[in-house]
Image (tube, rainbow, N blue to C red):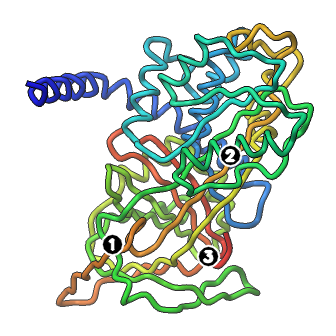
Amino acid sequence: MGIISLLISSSLLAVCVLGQTTDIEEIAAKNADFATRLYSTVSSSSDDNVVVSTFGATLALATLAVGAGGTSSTELLQGIGVASVEKDRETLLQQLRQTTAQIQATGLFTSQQVEADASFSTSVKQFYDANVQNLNYGNGVMAKGSINDYVRGRTGGKISDMVESVDSQTMAMLISAAYFTGQWQQPFNASNTQEERFYVNKYTIVQVPMMFRSDKYYLAYDPTLEVGILKLPCEDGMAMLVLLPNEDVDYTHIEESITGHVFRGWVAKLKKTKLEVQLPRFSLQQSNSLKMSLASLGIKEVFESSADLSGISRAEGLKLSEVLQKVAFDVDETGGSSGYASNNFFTTLPPRLTFNRPFIFIVYHEATKCILYIGRVVDPTKN
């Protein structure tokens, strides 16, 4: 009887999710512009490797929005692109979070003087799996340890040092941590990986472990932006687009041109073809303060004395001090864990696409087109 009840519950959940597929796709589409704008803003301040969990940032800001009012709420919801979705907004974002199933941690850490309202803590836990904790920022070592322990526990140890130090004057810190867990549907064969040249720029060449696979892949080309687009399908309904600009095209031009509309256009253009793919192994682990980037996107008031966060706490003058994100992103032959994969061999040699110069990647959920991560690899030997 227990098994039958479980099957019925699962069926009802599936029907419920299927019934709201259009709404989920709509909210993912609206959020895609925030994803591309956030990445563009963060990446513009660096010439090195970059990775941003754009959906992780969305969940963190949506968490804050639950307790925000007035202009603070408007800026947050407009910023992440969901202000026009008034009905079941939190439920749709919850379903999107559950559907994409990434390892991530969202937390709001307030000072001792700020007692969070119980209903706020309950709501953000339900919808966004976010935790609210009260810390003594006057004891920097203890506060840092509490944040790092929380993130370490939520990411299974994949991300350990979320913060290196804390400001004793902090009122509230919003944190987002994410670990890319995708595994390829078409793994690369590790025995075919060999050292190859990677051209960082005109003056710098590095040797990298270059993976290889010959198979049928989805491929597109954007003649306007002069960039090739390769799709690498992952397990759990995810996929990665890997963007290779023409040799004479600066990758920053592509980054500045990416929008939600452009992204969906690339996905729609993909066609299956025989192809040899060479892609370097790389591992990125990066921390970013998102405070300045969010302010440039119009999310300002929550950081100011005029902030309305009265739904979080009745504490007077409550404002957000910082938004921090740390992302771990590993790409190897299997995309996640060890394994073996054979190659398909064709009677005639297919064309080869070699990622031996800076490239951009976008990880997304295929069914909803929800963008999860955007990043850039300038030098695969660095993280």
| 226 up-or-down from 315: above or below | below
Amino acid type at circle 2 is Gln
Name the spot of residue 73 as percent of width and height, x first: 68, 16
Residue nearest the observer in this picture, 301 or 121: 121
Would you name the residue on which mark 2 appears? Answer: 325
Would you name the residue on which mark 1 appears? Answer: 187
| 54 up-or-down from 95: above or below | below
Foreground disc of the pair 3, 2: 2
Sequence-wise, the earlier of marks 3 and 2 is 2
Name the spot of residue 222 as percent of width and height, x first: 47, 60
How much space separates mark 1 and mark 3, taking CA atoms?
A: 19 Å
Q: Is residue 381 visible?
A: yes
| Residue at the spot 52% in from the left edge and 85% down from the top edge | 209
Name the spot of residue 210 as percent of width and height, x first: 49, 84
Residue nearest the observer in this picture, 320 or 112: 112
| Residue at the spot 79% in from the left edge and 18% down from the top edge | 114
Amino acid type at circle 1 is Pro
Q: Quadrant of residue 217?
A: bottom left
How much space separates mark 1 and mark 2, taking CA atoms?
A: 29 Å
Would you name the residue on which mark 3 appears? Answer: 380
| Residue at the spot 70% in from the left edge and 41% down from the top edge | 147
* Label 3 Cα neighbours within 10 Å, binned few <14 / some 14-19 / many ≥20: many
Amino acid type at circle 3 is Pro
